[in-house]
Image (cartoon, rainbow, N blue to C red):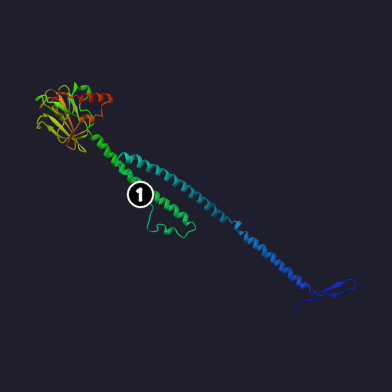
Amino acid sequence: MSKVKYYYDSETLSYRKIEKKKGRKLSIFLLSLVGMLLSGFLLLLVYLNLPYVETPKEKTLKRELTNMQLQYDLLNRKMDQAENVLNEIADRDNNLYRVYFEANPIPDEQRKAGFGGVNRYRDLEGFDNSKLIKTAHNRLDILTKQIVVQSRSLDEIAALAEEKEKLLAAIPAIQPVNNEDLTRMASGFGYRTDPFTKVRKKHWGMDFTAPRGTPVYASGDGKVTRSDNSASGYGNHIRIDHGYGYESLYAHLYKYNVRAGQTVKRGDLIGFVGSTGRSEAPHLHYEVFKDNERINPINFYYGNLSPEEFAELLKKSQQENQSLD
């Protein structure tokens, strides 16, 4: 039950009862409704603007996210650099190294092949940045595979280079008697007059005249297969197997400095000029074989002769004269 309220009327000098106006309740209701609407609107504005109001924790997380994005960009740039370097190495590998060593180039499809079949990145799915993470992992995996392919290629090139080095060292590529020790180059490869029968016949090597006891050197790396005088006509002679189908022969020696089974290097002293066997005067008879076929030794003196010396030797070797054996 509401209390009855009075007010003092100064004109009548008496208390009068306060009568409630009929529209007052309505006014109060309307004011309350307007207040509620204003409060709701203000709350709505605050709610809508909450994303722009960051808490300390949200600020920390945002900084971490920005840093992660920066690190990812740096990683991408590093992978770009690695890919560029690897592409340059692959280009040199295909167009220089493998060409020089006569190896087939590795196709790009093999170098840059991806990974088919099963989903390798299933464990990385379902996260907010799954696509980002999967892309990075895929690039790293492809880079790793390219490095493995290139590494194997370089291993192959290294093996080919080692074999090529052995081949170059084995080829009989120097003159077996030094120029300063020579009296002259008496006879070359080809048809010459036999000194004993005076018949024109094939001379299978080159004759270098030099005083008895002049040093004779191995023209390439190899293994001595013969060091004896049991072959008809050659007298004291040495044979060296250089491998790769090459063999050299040094005949009419005064004496040996090596024995059968011994390994020699190019330039090693193997014997001394003499006139043993079927020989007219002290000289070295020198032959070169390739796959058991005699070939002209003049083509194998690039190791110790200047262009001028080689030209002079070539001119003399082509003169059809009398051989010394």
Residue that protrudes farthest toward the front in the picture: 200
Instruction: Please state which amino acid type lies under the numbered disc 1.
Output: Gln
Which quadrant of the figure has residue 268? top left
Which quadrant of the figure has residue 307? top left
Label 1 Cα neighbours within 10 Å, binned few <14 / some 14-19 / many ≥20: few
Q: Which residue is mark 1?
A: 110
Q: Please state the horizontal and vertical placement of residue 51, each as a whole percent of the image.
A: 60, 58
Q: Residue at x 53, y 51 (%)?
A: 66
In which quadrant will I find the C terminus? top left
Q: Is residue 4 above or below residue 136?
A: below
Q: Residue at x 76, y 72 (%)?
A: 26
- Horizontally, residue 17 falls left or right of residue 320, namely right
Residue that protrudes farthest toward the bottom in the picture: 1
Q: Residue at x 38, y 42 (%)?
A: 91
How many marks can you see? 1
Q: Secondary structure at mark 1?
A: helix
Which quadrant of the figure has residue 280? top left
Q: Residue at x 31, y 38 (%)?
A: 100
Q: Please state the horizontal and vertical placement of residue 283, each as a whole percent of the image.
A: 15, 24
- Horizontally, residue 82 falls left or right of residue 205, namely right
**278 and 34: which is toward the camera:** 278
Q: Is residue 95 above or below residue 209?
A: below
Q: Please state the horizontal and vertical placement of residue 68, each as a whole percent of the image.
A: 50, 51
Q: Please state the horizontal and vertical placement of residue 178, each as a whole percent of the image.
A: 22, 25
**57 and 309: which is toward the camera:** 309
In which quadrant will I find the N terminus? bottom right
Q: Is residue 182 above or below residue 169?
A: above
